[in-house]
Amino acid sequence: MNTKEVIADLQRRFPNEPEYHQAVEEVLSSIEDVYNEHPEFERYNLIERLCIPDRIFAFRVSWVDDNGRVRNNMGYRVQHNNAIGPYKGGIRFHASVNLSILKFLAFEQTFKNSLTTLAMGGAKGGSDFSPRGRSDMEIMRFCQAYVAELWRHIGADTDVPAGDIGVGAREVGYMYGYYKKMAREFTGTFTGKGIAFGGSLIRPEATGYGNCYFLQNMLATRGLEITGRRVAISGSGNVATYTAKKIMELGGKVVSMSDSGGSIIAPDGLTREQFDYIFELKTYMRGRLHEVPERFPELQYHPDRSPWRLVQCDIAMPSATQNELNVLDAEALLAGGCFAVSEGANMPSTPEAVHRFIEARILYAPGKAANAGGVATSGLEMAQNSQKLSWSAEEVDRRLAEIMRGIHEQCVRYGSEADGYVNYVRGANIAGFMKVADAMMAQGVL
Ligand code: NDP
Ligand code: 2IT
């Protein structure tokens, strides 16, 4: 089967999974030439084996809310591929979670993890449980019920979960605690743990900081810098807030942040005081951005809008969720002079938007390259856990910056076109794919 036939076949066999089809189509269309140069891949039916997850666990998660009512959610773990290392990837708790979304995320994770150069396969898990509005005790009971089923399928050298949307240090702490009790071992089976029990310094910051480091490498190819640039960011969770923090540290102006209710626009850039308030509000008080103008009336709040058409920017860093930036947003960004897009979220730009960015020859980094700093630092947490050592923040940050530089280099190597333009989508997909493909070929049909 050629790559187009594989896509058609997957669509027929796994209908109603649009995000999964979207992610597969993007990767397969960019590796087509490389695939055709390797007839042995077809003999081993490699592409199909690489697109279909190794296995999927799906289970009911029953728990009791604060009013004594029994609630039922669905829990999942998609173990996509472990050719180059143990399954590795985050857990998402959000009402929208379904198998299509987790299959796309686990598929993307496999190539992202390959790009980091660390020994990690790809996985993703989660639940349609929504933590919003739930008490701490409800969240703890939910996490325990989820892990009561999951724990036998994971392990430090088997499958290592971490955070994603709706899962941060609090949820990882509850999940790890219950895992430890069931498995009767204290090993690095989760990453993103608290510092007191095996977590790594810089892991909370890593995805956002890593994206800024990637952006710096990308800008350097055109002799540009972040200093003085207007940067539009979406989201106000883990990835978005640490992206904003680093952009400000590097002298950039953060002109927007958002949550699922709407966007905050700061035409002159957020001040440190405004950013600190937003960070506190979203991270610790679990508040909503619509509350921000009560404290800072000079900031504009736009309900039900993403930032892309609300403010002019030089650089866009979508850091909320998949398909949050469509072709009309892309047109508006380009018309406003935006010359770089670096994705903090996974697959935030629709295929049409990506096409427009590449057609316009701007710097465009897909999530699997630009946001790989999070999982890379998870890999560093795993390394520290196996050594039973903790590295300093400077040491982890230095390694993170080095890994991001290496990912950028791989993208340039595999993605440079005849006219000198670097197609980072093609570069990331080919570099990520080749390593996994070689490992699968060497290990036989599994
Ligand atoms: P958080 O839960 O910390 O934050 C998510 C943010 O995005 C919140 O501001 C949330 O708004 C907003 N958001 C979530 N869903 C939607 C939606 N459907 N529409 C509009 N806004 C939405 O998650 P993270 O910051 O960890 O994750 C953000 C993105 O980054 C995801 O795509 C994730 O897969 C990706 N990522 C995360 C990594 C990590 O290490 N955490 C690593 C690499 C990628 P609200 O507050 O209203 O819910
Ligand atoms: O999408 C991602 O890379 C993550 N959510 C982080 C995964 C991890 O294992 O740290």
Image (spheres, grey):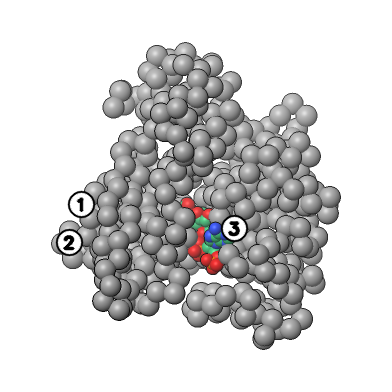
Please tell me in which quadrant of the rendered image residue 86 appears.
top left
**Classed neighbour count for the residue bearing mark 1: other residues with Cα under 10 Å, few (<14), some (14–19), many (≥20):** few
Amino acid type indicated by mark 1: Arg
**Can the viewer see residue 382?**
no
Q: Is mark 1 on a helix, strand or loop?
A: helix
Amino acid type indicated by mark 2: Met
The outermost residue toward the bottom is 295
**Classed neighbour count for the residue bearing mark 2: other residues with Cα under 10 Å, few (<14), some (14–19), many (≥20):** few
Q: In this view, does 187 lie above or below 84?
A: below
Q: Nearer the viewer, residue 389 or 1?
A: 1
Q: Is residue 342 above or below residue 165?
A: above
For the point 42% across and 68% down, which residue is it? Answer: 131
Q: Which of 437 and 56 is in front in this view?
A: 56
Residue 319's tag is 3
Give coordinates of residue 210: x percent, y percent: 57, 56
Is the C-beta separation of discs 1 and 2 under 8 Å? yes
Residue 152's tag is 1
Give coordinates of residue 138: x percent, y percent: 32, 74
Amino acid type indicated by mark 3: Ser
